[in-house]
Image (cartoon, grey):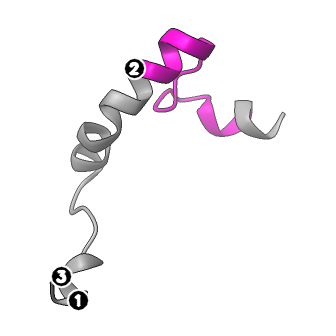
């Protein structure tokens, strides 16, 4: 695979959310933590 294609990333916030949705569901179920929630950044550092 072309290395430049490997690191293109996502084009929008919606693409990030879609990619993280399965992981976020797991974190909610197991740890009652919403990775995509508005207070997620604050919760990690407190």
Q: Residue at x 31, y 39 (%)?
A: 17
Sequence-wise first label, 1 or 2: 1
- State the residue position of label 2: 25
Q: Is residue 39 magenta?
A: yes
Query: Residue placed farthest to the front in the image?
Result: 1
Q: Is residue 30 magenta?
A: yes
Residue 19 position, x and y percent, is 27, 43
Is residue 28 left or right of 15 when viewed as pictured?
Answer: right
Q: Residues within 10 Å of mark 2 (few under 14, many from 20)?
A: some
Total marks drawn? 3
Is residue 14 left or right of 33 when viewed as pictured?
Answer: left
Residue 5 numbered tag: 3
Is residue 31 left or right of 19 when viewed as pictured?
Answer: right
Write down the quadrant of residue 32 in the picture. Answer: top right
What segment carries the magenta color?
26-42
Instruction: Tell me whether circle 3 and circle 2 mark residues in contact (CB < 8 Å).
Output: no
Q: Residue at x 25, y 61 (%)?
A: 10
Distance from Cα at disc 3 to Cα at disc 1: 4 Å
Element on which disc 2 rests: helix
Is residue 40 left or right of 1 when viewed as pictured?
Answer: right
Q: Residue at x 56, y 13 (%)?
A: 30
- State the residue position of label 1: 4
Quadrant in which the N terminus is drawn: bottom left
Residue 44 position, x and y percent, is 72, 36
Q: Is residue 29 above or below residue 14?
A: above
Q: Is residue 16 above or below residue 20?
A: below
Q: Residues within 10 Å of mark 3 (few under 14, many from 20)?
A: few
Q: Is residue 33 above or below residue 45?
A: above
Instruction: Tell me whether circle 3 and circle 1 mark residues in contact (CB < 8 Å).
Output: yes
């Amino acid at each position: 695979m072309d290395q430049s294609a490997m690191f293109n990333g996502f084009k929008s916030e919606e693409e990030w959310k879609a990619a993280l949705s399965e992981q976020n569901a797991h974190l909610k179920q197991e740890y009652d933590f919403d990775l995509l929630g508005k207070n997620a950044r604050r919760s990690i550092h407190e």
